[in-house]
Image (cartoon, grey):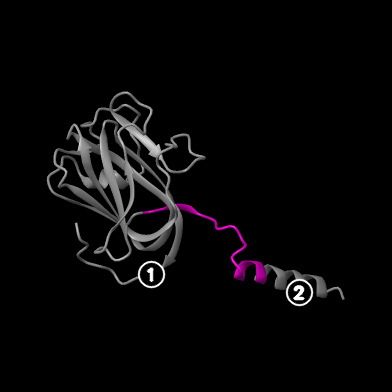
């Protein structure tokens, strides 16, 4: 009788987990690489160094990657397919940015568009988050969880002085995939 209670609890716990009733625990995910396409200033590795410059930093500061053409893009690789539930990004406050996602690095779908009026700063770099519990939460940046290995960021509208300094995502690892040595830019 003394061993019946722990066995019963293990059966109940196994059932809860198998039915998906247990809360999914997410954590910060780490990009294994980022690759820029087109002309830009400063190294694209600044975008994954986990260092956010101070709010309202000038768009062409030493901690920012900046460019002047909507043809420029940056592809971030998580190294494997992950569930992504939130992101935080720092961008120049008066431009519009598009974030797309892909599992294979070839077929991208739109994730969200960051509008120039989402942020709180008047000038320079602005940090924005999709996480309602983050102090940088931007009301217009709602997203549903996705599965992806790659994220692509492009600037699309504004004063054409595009800039961003950091992209962080949270989620959990899903499954390993074969590496794509040539993701579509």
The residue lying at 32 percent from left, 23 percent from top is 122
In front here: 34 or 145?
Answer: 145
Q: Quadrant of residue 7?
A: bottom right
In front here: 95 or 33?
Answer: 95
Magenta span contains residue 22: yes
Q: Which residue is mark 1?
A: 176
Instruction: Kindly state the secondary structure of the residue where label 1 is placed.
Output: loop
The location of residue 28, given as percent across then percent down, is: 44, 51
- What residue occupies the far left of the structure in this picture? 39
> Are discs 2 and 1 less than 8 Å apart at CB?
no
Q: What's the magenta region?
A: 15-30
81 displayed left or right of 155: right
Residue 7 bears which disc, if any? Answer: 2
Magenta span contains residue 37: no
Give the CA distance from mark 2 to mark 1: 33 Å
Of labels 2 and 1, earlier in sequence is 2
The location of residue 126, given as percent across then percent down, is: 34, 32
Q: Quadrant of residue 24?
A: bottom right
The location of residue 64, given as percent across then percent down, is: 25, 37
The residue lying at 30 percent from left, 33 percent from top is 116
The residue lying at 20 percent from left, 32 percent from top is 60
The residue lying at 62 percent from left, 67 percent from top is 17
Q: Quadrant of the C terminus?
A: bottom left
């Amino acid at each position: 009788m003394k061993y019946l209670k722990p066995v019963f609890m293990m059966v109940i716990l196994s059932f809860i987990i198998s039915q998906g009733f247990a809360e999914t625990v997410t954590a910060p995910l780490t990009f294994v690489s980022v690759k820029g396409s087109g002309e830009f200033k400063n190294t694209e590795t600044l975008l994954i160094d986990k260092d956010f410059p101070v709010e309202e930093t000038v768009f062409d500061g030493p901690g920012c990657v900046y460019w002047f053409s909507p043809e420029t893009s940056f592809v971030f690789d998580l190294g494997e397919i992950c569930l992504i539930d939130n992101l935080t990004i720092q961008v120049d406050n008066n431009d519009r940015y598009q974030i797309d996602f892909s599992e294979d690095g070839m077929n991208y779908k739109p994730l969200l568009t960051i509008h120039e009026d989402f942020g709180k700063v008047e000038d320079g770099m602005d940090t924005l988050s999709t996480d309602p519990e983050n102090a940088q939460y931007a009301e217009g940046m709602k997203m549903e969880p996705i599965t992806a290995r790659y994220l692509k960021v492009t600037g699309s509208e504004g004063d054409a002085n595009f800039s961003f300094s950091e992209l962080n995502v949270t989620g959990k690892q899903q499954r390993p995939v074969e590496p794509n040595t040539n993701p579509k830019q």
